[in-house]
Amino acid sequence: MANLQVTGPDRESPSEGLNDLEYLGGEVRVAREGRKLSQVQLGKATGYSKSYVCKVEGGVIIPSVEFARKCDVVFGTPGMFERLRQRIVERGHPSWFAPYAKMEGSAVEMLIYSLNVIPGLLQTESYAEAIFRVDDPQPGAEEVRQRVAKRMARKTILTRDVPPMLWVVLHESALRTVIGDAAVMRDQMARLAEAARTPRVTLQILPFGAGCLPAIVPFTALRFRDGGTTLYSDTIAGGQMSDSPQQVTYASRAFDRLRMESLGTGESLRLVEKIEREYRDAAGSN
């Protein structure tokens, strides 16, 4: 699907090929420069810092509702930036996953809850490939390869000098659901166990015995250095993001309950290792 094509009057649009979040940021920059305002001046006019304006223009963060509304006042664009922002938040298709991935790279803490699949940041190549082939059987081998490569590239945030703190609550069904075959699952369990042993990754398994779940929809909460939080959740219609304080609070409380119902980190790791051995035996017998 094409990028957003909404532009303000008598202004040059940002370059094509940008993701939606970068597009919005480019529109803010074009409007600001058109009115000969510096980032500091726009920050003062909207009640935000120069750093915040820089991140918005760089397509690193979703601007707040308040910032978007004040931009409309400053630039004389009734509702335009608020609509651009709302469209990014509500768009239900994979094309805007790119802005989420960019935000993911600037998070200092990530809380991930997954029900029946291993989170993308912890997937092996073969596991990711099996998911993409089932998710959409139409793409050819080269397109699948490119999708896998992009997913693997996201994992570099976990190996940088100061990676984000990653806390994952994973339902046991994600360990038991066979994606690909036993060999794929064996390698995936080994990767999961390896990640769980690193100091900045906390893994807890929510066992079948936990019963009724505190949350029935998987979600990710990205927390940033400035204290802001953005939620991401997959649905049948695609992904959705939100920075609504009410929804962030609800998700945070749900995650706390999930952690309480889950196995401890040591017991979780032992369960992953046990299931890895089961898959190893199954793969060896085939």
Image: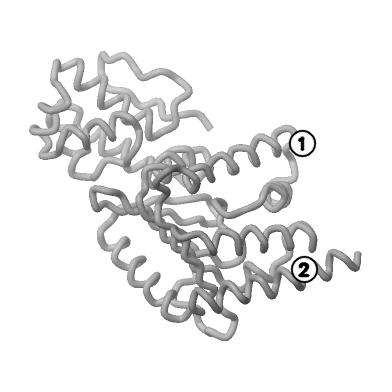
Colour pattern of the rendering: one colour
- Dot placed on the residue nearer the N-terminal end, 1 or 2: 1
Q: Is residue 90 left or right of residue 47?
A: right
Residue carrying label 2: 279
The image position of residue 284, as x and y in percent, is 87, 65
- Neighbor class of circle 2 (other Cα within 10 Å; few <14, some 14-19, many 20+) is many
The image position of residue 279, as x and y in percent, is 77, 68
Amino acid type assigned to the residue bearing label 1 in the image: Ala
Q: Is residue 191 left or right of residue 228?
A: right
Question: Depth check: 278 or 209 in front?
Answer: 278
Q: Is residue 84 left or right of residue 261?
A: left
Q: Is residue 161 left or right of residue 248?
A: right
The image position of residue 109, as x and y in percent, is 37, 55
The answer to whether 212 is drawn above or below residue 187 in the figure is below
Query: Residue visible at 41% across and 33% down?
Result: 20
Query: Residue visible at 32% across and 41% down?
Result: 62
Task: Label 2: state its secondary structure.
Answer: helix
Residue carrying label 1: 141
> Given the current orientation, which residue lies at the most extreme right position?
286
Q: Can residue 52 be spotted in the picture?
A: yes
The answer to whether 137 is drawn above or below residue 20 in the figure is below
Query: Residue visible at 48% across and 50% down?
Result: 239
The answer to whether 68 is drawn above or below residue 134 in the figure is above
Amino acid type assigned to the residue bearing label 2 in the image: Tyr
Task: Label 1: state its secondary structure.
Answer: helix
